[in-house]
Amino acid sequence: MNPLKKIKLISLAALLPFALTACKKDSNNSPVTPQSNTITIENVLESQPLVESGTFQGTGTPALIQPGQSTTITFAAAKGEALSFATMYGASNDLFFAPANPGIQVYDNSGNPIEGDVSAQIKLWDNGTRVNQKPGSTVTHPGVTEAKNISEVIGADAQGNTYLPASKLVKATLKYNGNSTFTLTLQNTSAGTTNETPLSPGVWSVSYIVGGALQAPNPLYTVGQPTANGLTNIAEAGDNTALSAYAKSITGIFTPLSPVLVVVYNGINNPIYTTNQSDAGKGLTPLAQKGNADTLAAYLKTVKGVKAVYVLPAPNTKVLLPSIAGKQGGVVSQQLDVAAGDRLAIATMYGFSNDWFFASADNGVDATQKGDISGTIKLFDDGTAINQFPGAGLTQFNLAGTPLKESQPITAVPNPNAFTTLPPVTGIIKVTLK
């Protein structure tokens, strides 16, 4: 026998057992060993009750709003949200101007923006911390202390001093700027009246509305209760520093997360979305705009390479609420059967937006890994609805609005963005595998 031929035969004989073993494994389609993993998604946002807050003042030094002068406040608001503010009646011991709670209404019952003179909504209040003297330039500051609750001054104070209606001393004019933003102009109209007075620098705020209820219905003061949170500094001395710091401390982000879409897949790229491309029209738009993942879930179940699809609503509430007043936020979990090579991706709506959604970045994560994978989640703009201030948009679906269409590619939401600065994504959504 040819020696080379003999070597070939020996080599083939040596390899044959391995070849037969491999063929046998393939012919039996022995599955890759599965393992169990549990995914848990939590809304860990420490929510705040105010959407926005800020300060206003005059142009002089000190920054008073003198008779005949005016100042402006620009803000965003959704239907049902209102603008509150407080400014000192300067020629008094402890009186201040403010709208009746919860503030100046900026939409009518049909959701149409209100424009024009809204002065009738401004009232005059007694802070209850100083005995009132006759208002005017001869008032001695700070005056004699007292300890009463905040009360409205209607015509006369407890000492018999008389006052014109607040609407005769301060004119408030509302202008709609479009896209849920307004400008309120406050003009000091007290010149030449018996109640001529400067107005102090002030503080303003807008409260979130959640399920039809304002999170801060009495944002700066409460009638019939003692003054608090630095309002006295404004009412007695026109100093807005302390009240501004308080308002700022309760201003921030509030958003629920929609029922969470979870998909396990293998051999394909992330099937939920592709950045820098337009929404594919397979169901991501309802998720991003309305928090409804059902259409996308149904589509994904037909995609080759997708192994499992889940939609996880929170118990009772369906949406995952944030932490409110220290109470734990919403949590959902799902047991997964996964194997080596499987990938995992999720998506959930930033509830108080027009079309923002949280999702696994790039091609998701190894579905078999363990631990906190929150760092792999990013916030995206679906590009299908015009953006407004998150939590203060008239056309945001979860604030009783109808999104206004646009057509832009899917992109990451910048932070800071055109409206506000968000917490890190990991400060809003936590995702763990165990």
Image (cartoon, helix red, strand yellow):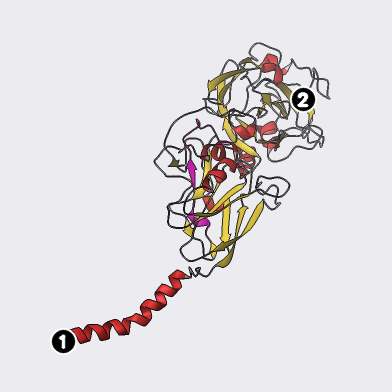
Q: Position of residue 229 (x, y in %)?
A: 69, 41
Q: Position of residue 175 (x, y in %)?
A: 57, 18
Q: Is residue 221 above or below residue 29?
A: above
Evaluate whether residue 176 shows in this view.
Answer: yes
Sequence-wise first label, 2 or 1: 1
Q: Nearer the viewer, mark 2 or mark 1?
A: 1
Which structural element holds mark 2?
A: loop
Q: Describe residue 79's horizontal placement relative to residue 271 as left or right.
A: right
Rendered residue at 54%/43% (across/down):
296
The residue singled out by tag 1 in the image is: 2
Say which mark, if any, is on residue 412: none
As shown in the figure, which amino acid type bears the numbered disc 1?
Asn
Q: Is residue 185 above or below residue 35?
A: above
Q: Position of residue 184 (x, y in %)?
A: 59, 22
Q: Describe residue 33's horizontal placement relative to residue 316 as left or right.
A: left
Q: Which residues are magenta?
A: 373-390
Q: Is residue 384 above or below residue 306?
A: above
Which structural element holds mark 1?
A: loop
The residue singled out by tag 2 in the image is: 133
As shown in the figure, which amino acid type bears the numbered disc 2?
Gln
Rendered residue at 40%/75% (across/down):
22
Rendered residue at 57%/63% (across/down):
337
Q: Is residue 205 within the magenta segment?
A: no
